[in-house]
Image (spheres, helix red, strand yellow):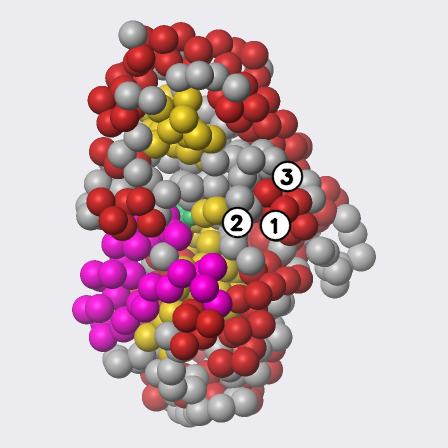
Amino acid sequence: MSDAPHPYGFDTLQVHAGAKPDPATGARQTPIYQTTAYVFRDADHAAALFNLQEVGFIYSRLTNPTVAALQERIAALEGGVGAVATSSGHAAQILALFPLMGPGDNIVSSRRLYGGTITQFTHTIRRFGWEARFADTEDLAALEAACDGRTKAIFCESICNPGGYVTDIPALAEIARRVGVPLIVDNTTATPYLCNPIAMGATLVIHSTTKYLSGNGSSMGGVVVDSGQFDWSASDRFPSLSQPEPAYHGLKFHETFGPLAYVLHGHAIGLRDLGMCQSPMNAWITLQGIETLSLRMDKHVANAKAVAEWLEADPRVSAVTWPGLASSPWHARAQALYPKGAGALFTFGVKGGYEACVKLVDSVEIFSHVANLGDTRSLIIHPASTTHRQLDPEQQVAAGAAPDMVRLSIGIESAADLIADLDQALAAATA
Ligand SMILES: *Cc1c(COP(=O)(O)O)cnc(C)c1O
């Protein structure tokens, strides 16, 4: 699926993109620019920076060299023109919508989403006057019918946490194109190594870099990547990008910056006024993680396959939702869209229901019982009693988080040890 504009392969870009030896010292590793502000050469330089006539650094809420290296690297891996890093994945979702939305506007969103995103979209964004209309991404006609003149984006996840659902990104991109709005894909669980939404027609890609990109469960972060391919001036749907923007002395972002309009808006207005910047330290840790992304993802996927196949053959288990299994309803789509593997995050059903699931998470030894995913360590959680607890039972089932389901985020340990741990924990849970 990748017709990346870059001349280098993924493995080269994950190590080198965005990072040059430090011009001041020659330091080969990207320095952690732990600074708030940057000295202007003179008053003219300061004025040019504030007018966005020259690219440079003013204040670390807007831009920071270490964070810029991270943005450039992720943009290169996703095949975008640029990116805006944020303090968390949830912040990336707000920042991604901010240039597009005003009070009374809506997005049409897949209902198969990370539980926290459902909550953010159902309740919190309403306080900005924004509405999320949830639609079934398997009913494309209904999804398209949910869009109207105030729709500003279609939103989905690539491989859905937690239910092992694989979204048909090319089909959603086609609907977004017809409606005249960007498709935003949360690519957190697949990563740019397994999935390139932009190559499949998405306009914007977001990540919680907290997960596989940083990779070892140490650092919060998020990012919004723009493909640079959307014509914001094709209609008057996106006035903040196509019309004079009063929040930046009447600047017309799209006319002035062309394909970089959305990314510059994200820095100049989004980060400036909403303030959810990523710290240089977290950006640096995430850069280290990304250097080994492809190696880790291959191992995550191989381990997920081994564990999923073992679980599926076990009589104590009622279902396994890894989309790489032939039994998954999304198997064919996963093969077509994700030839390198269908991720390492899935659920399985435990005979014995809610009680057995709770016992299981209390009995594991190598797996950690945490509300996170995409760690080198294998993780386990019971969504119905934790991450999806705020949802009603119908929403839980729709999100793939039914009461008898346990979610695994498979790490990079020895597969045999992971299987042995689940074996003993299942024995305790179903005794
Ligand atoms: C974790 C996650 C988020 C939220 O990211 P944070 O970094 O925790 O704010 C959003 N979407 C998906 C798919 C996630 O897994």
Residue 190, placed above or below residue 217: below
Q: Is residue 154 left or right of residue 233?
A: left
Q: Nearer the viewer, residue 120 or 331?
A: 331
Binning the other alpha carbons within 10 Å of mark 1 as few (below 14), some (14 to 19) or many (20 upward) gives some
Q: Residue at x 66, y 45 (%)?
A: 335
Q: Amino acid at mark 3?
A: Gly
* Residue 58: percent from left, percent from top: 45, 66
Q: Which residue is mark 3?
A: 341
Asked where in the image residue 353 lies, by quadrant, the reply is: top left
Secondary element under disc 2, as helix, strand or loop, is strand
Highlighted magenta segment, given as a residue range = 112-140
Question: Residue 80 at what x, y percent from top left?
Answer: 62, 63
Q: Is residue 121 magenta?
A: yes
From the image, state whether disc 1 or disc 3 is nearer to you: 1
Q: What label does residue 166 carry, if any?
A: 2
Residue 282: x %, y % from top left: 44, 43
Sequence-wise first label, 1 or 3? 1
Q: Residue at x 23, y 72 (%)?
A: 128
Residue 84 visible somewhere in the drawing: no
Q: Secondary structure at mark 3?
A: loop
Q: Give the spatial CA distance, label 1 vs label 3.
A: 11 Å
**In the rendered view of the protein, which quadrant contains the N terminus?**
bottom right
Q: CA distance from mark 2 to mark 1?
A: 7 Å
Report the side of 282 relative to 313 (left or right).
left
Please state if 45 lies on the left or on the right of 271 as rendered. right
Q: Is residue 331 covered in magenta?
A: no
The one nearer the camera, 245 or 117, is 117
Residue at the disc numbered 1: 333
Amino acid type shown at disc 1: Arg
Using residue 392 as the reference point, say whether residue 256 is left or right of it.
right
Label 2 with label 1: CB-CB less than 8 Å: yes
